[in-house]
């Protein structure tokens, strides 16, 4: 019996041990669930018991430097549905889901079957239509209230809106349907702009039906931060319009680029890349694509958009800078004192590695000249010899110092990280690089380097963002100007500014000349890799003003021009000059006219009304306005009455223009044929028009390249013909 008792006891102990172990494990598990996973499980249970509708936060506004709105979030509505509640409502009311879908489709202008499919889903929550106008949202609300419909909701939402459409599109970028930034500043500054969504919470039962008489809980969204850019809306507009006009007039098949920068602090005042797009509708068909067959959202379509209209060529494309790069070689030569402005040089051919390098004007060499004159004339061999004097190591030291081997770090996506240079450059590589050929850089890198030339030698990091502000206007983060390094001395900078001013006054950059403003810069014409087969060139001009105290730097690039010229000095320089003039006027920079400027300025006057005056009275009136006259009819009778005149009263013409006076009422005005003014000088064109009774409005200098009325067209005497003049000789 004792043995049996012992055996029973042992069995009892084993059972108790097992029970204890099980209890211990259960206790540990329960403790783990409560202490470790309790919060998580509670959250899961809460999620299952609640229906949460998102409230979109207001995305931060993007402003220009003066507080003008460039990207804003407009208030819209989103219609959502709890299908279980709607089905329960329809059942209780004795109506069909088809009737509800029919009414919604009418208000929302949607396909009824699409809505009906959503009402039949077995989900807690679905979106019927998002980002509808508030007017439409109010109609849905009114219908819901009038019918006491359960399960359909209209919640506030936001939609991104770009009030100036294409303006600064490549800077701003755009957002997707979920308000997420997909390109430009919208993408780069997403974490600041997006904000945090809010929620409207409702309790639901096991069938996903909203529990009646339970109040909804609202968690307000947190609005995103505002971004203030360095961009000036007006300057951006000036640059865009000037570039658009140049692309059209010069038939630049691959578009163009314009950048305006403040050399003193690196601020980007404008950045234009063409072709472009409307960020309000970024997936629209690009130019040249049939919109009727366009989807916009396929992989192929998106790839095409990325390679064309979405591509910011200013930071994402590289190109051969051509002779604009000669300013860099000149800066290195002056800094290392291997050359001085008055050093006598020549543009005779130079042979490097079996290659003969000629001046672009090999048909009529400039011969011996000072170094400053060689810059005016853009003589390639001179710059090759400067590079040779520097040596490979020193030459490329300055190339690196000016920032051409590194990204600028601008706050934009898609910037090229590695430019195209020979990894182990030889003498011939350096030779052609000295005048800007056979390597590639970005337009932003070039204008950043020019800013260093203009501002005393300091390479500045391009700045696109000034500051970040909260929704109350408080500054959260400020972006200060950054000096990367000093590249050249202030003395070299001053010397080179003076030389580059001479390029515009006397040399290849004459078409960038602006009366009253001292403009400095350099022209460039480069061949692309496609030149041999397609004849493709890139024309450019980079410059700044006023030359003695620069406040604005401008780069203009025209890609693949196919009109009357492909030379940078002919087609890019005048665009840069136009932008510089308009920007300096806008900034209030005072003009300082030279005596030559004053002599050539044509004052505009408004034509006075001399009708019903005697010939003598009309003659005296016109003389007071510094206008000439010509009489059709009785021109010998001072008492003859002027019946009509051409141009008509109020027309704007220049001083010394001719007004045709009629002493009779003509059945037909005296008409003349407009002559062909091509390649005529200002004097020759003016005389040709005045001799036949026509007036001229002059733009530019040099020879006539474009006239407002086609040759051979019959017009009335007195008509004003606008003529554009450009320098086409001694330009590159």
Image: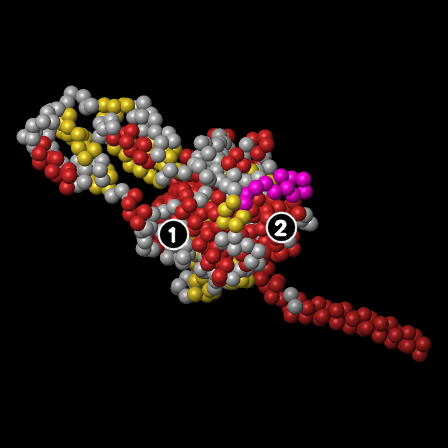
Q: Please state the horizontal and vertical placement of residue 76, each as a whole percent of the image.
A: 40, 49
Task: Tell me if residue 357 comes above or below residue 465 in the rendering.
Answer: above
Badge 1, how many Cα within 10 Å: few under 14, some, many 20+? many
Name the quadrant containing residue 318. top right
Task: Name the residue: 41% across, 54% down.
Answer: 547
Query: On residue 388, which mark appears?
Result: 2
Magenta span covers which residues? 346-356
> Horizontal placement of 313 versus 155: left or right?
right
Q: Quadrant of the N terminus?
A: bottom right
Residue at (48, 58) in percent of width and height: 493
Q: Nearer the viewer, residue 269 or 276?
A: 269
Closer to viewer: mark 1 or mark 2: 2
* Residue in front for this viewpoint, 53 or 57: 57
Q: Position of residue 585 (x, y in %)?
A: 33, 51
Disc 2 is placed on an element classified as: helix
> Which residue is situated farthest in the top direction here?
667
> Which scheme is used to colour this image of the protein?
secondary structure
Residue 350 painted magenta: yes
Residue 587: percent from left, percent from top: 35, 55
Residue 49 x/y as whole percent = 54, 57
> Element type at marker 1?
loop
Density class for disc 2 (Cα within 10 Å; few <14, some 14-19, many ≥20) is some
Q: Are marks 1 and 2 in contact (CB under 8 Å)?
A: no
Answer yes or no: is residue 186 visible: no
């Amino acid at each position: 019996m004792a043995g049996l008792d012992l055996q029973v006891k042992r069995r009892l102990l084993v059972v108790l041990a097992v029970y204890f172990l099980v209890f211990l494990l259960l206790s540990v598990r329960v403790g783990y669930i409560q202490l470790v996973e309790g919060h998580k499980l509670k959250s899961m249970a809460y999620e299952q018991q609640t229906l949460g509708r998102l409230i979109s936060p207001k995305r931060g506004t993007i402003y220009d430097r003066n507080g003008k709105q460039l990207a804003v979030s407009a208030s819209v509505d989103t219609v959502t549905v709890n299908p279980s509640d709607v089905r329960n409502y329809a059942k209780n009311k004795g109506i069909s889901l088809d009737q509800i879908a029919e009414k919604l489709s009418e208000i929302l202008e949607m396909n009824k079957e699409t809505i009906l499919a959503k009402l039949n889903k077995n989900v807690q929550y679905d979106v019927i239509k998002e980002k509808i106008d508030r007017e439409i949202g109010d109609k849905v609300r009114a219908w819901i209230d009038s019918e006491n419909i359960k399960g359909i909701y209209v919640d506030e939402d936001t939609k991104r809106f770009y009030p100036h459409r294409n303006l600064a599109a490549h800077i701003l970028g755009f957002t997707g349907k979920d308000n997420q930034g997909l390109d430009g500043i919208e993408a780069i500054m997403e974490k600041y702009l997006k904000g945090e969504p809010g929620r409207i919470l409702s309790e639901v039962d096991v069938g996903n039906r909203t529990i009646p008489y339970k109040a909804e809980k609202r968690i307000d969204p947190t609005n995103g931060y505002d971004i203030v850019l360095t961009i000036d809306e007006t300057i951006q507009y000036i640059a865009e319009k000037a570039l658009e006009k140049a692309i059209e007039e010069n038939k630049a098949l691959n578009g163009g680029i314009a950048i305006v920068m403040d050399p003193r602090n690196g601020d980007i005042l404008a950045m234009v890349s063409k072709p472009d797009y409307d960020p309000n509708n970024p997936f629209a068909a690009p130019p040249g694509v049939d919109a009727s067959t366009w989807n916009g959202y396929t992989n192929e379509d998106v790839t095409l958009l990325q390679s064309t209209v979405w591509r910011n060529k200013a930071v994402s494309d590289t190109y051969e800078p051509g002779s604009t790069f000669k300013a860099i070689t000149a800066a290195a030569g002056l800094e290392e004192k291997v050359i001085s402005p008055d050093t006598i040089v020549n543009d005779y051919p130079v042979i490097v590695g079996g290659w003969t390098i000629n001046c672009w004007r090999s048909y009529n060499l400039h011969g011996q000249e000072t170094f400053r004159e060689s810059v005016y004339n853009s003589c390639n061999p001179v710059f090759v010899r400067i590079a040779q004097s520097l040596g490979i190591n020193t030459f490329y030291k300055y190339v690196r110092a000016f920032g051409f081997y590194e990204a600028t770090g601008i706050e934009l996506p898609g910037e090229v990280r590695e430019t195209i240079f020979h990894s182990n450059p030889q003498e011939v590589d350096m030779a052609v690089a000295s005048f800007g050929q056979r390597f590639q850089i970005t337009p932003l890198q070039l204008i950043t380097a020019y800013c260093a030339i203009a501002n005393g030698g300091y390479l500045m990091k391009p700045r696109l963002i000034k500051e970040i502000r909260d929704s109350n206007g408080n500054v959260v983060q400020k972006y200060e100007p950054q000096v990367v390094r000093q590249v050249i001395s202030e003395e070299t900078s001053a010397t080179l500014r003076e030389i580059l001013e001479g390029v515009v006054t006397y040399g290849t950059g004459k078409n960038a000349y602006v009366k009253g403003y001292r403009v400095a810069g350099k022209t460039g014409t480069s061949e692309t890799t496609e030149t041999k087969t397609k004849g493709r060139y890139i024309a450019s001009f980079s410059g700044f003003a006023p030359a003695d105290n620069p406040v604005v730097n401008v780069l203009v690039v025209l890609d693949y021009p196919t009109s009357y010229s492909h030379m940078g000095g002919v087609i890019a320089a005048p665009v840069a000059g136009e932008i510089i003039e308009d920007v300096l006027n806008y900034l209030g920079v005072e003009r300082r006219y030279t005596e030559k400027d004053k002599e050539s300025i044509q004052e505009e006057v408004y034509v006075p009304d001399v009708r019903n005056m005697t010939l003598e009275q009309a003659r005296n009136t016109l003389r007071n306005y510094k206008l000439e006259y010509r009489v059709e009819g009785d021109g010998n009778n001072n008492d003859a009455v002027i019946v009509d005149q051409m141009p008509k009263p109020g027309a704007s013409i220049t001083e010394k223009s001719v007004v045709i006076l009629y002493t009779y009422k003509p059945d037909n005005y005296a008409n003349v044929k407009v002559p062909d003014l091509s390649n005529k000088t200002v004097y020759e064109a003016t005389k040709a028009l005045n001799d036949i009774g026509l007036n001229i409005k002059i733009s530019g200098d040099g020879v006539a390249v474009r006239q407002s009325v086609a040759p051979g067209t019959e017009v009335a005497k007195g008509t004003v013909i606008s003529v554009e003049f450009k320098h086409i000789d001694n330009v590159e």
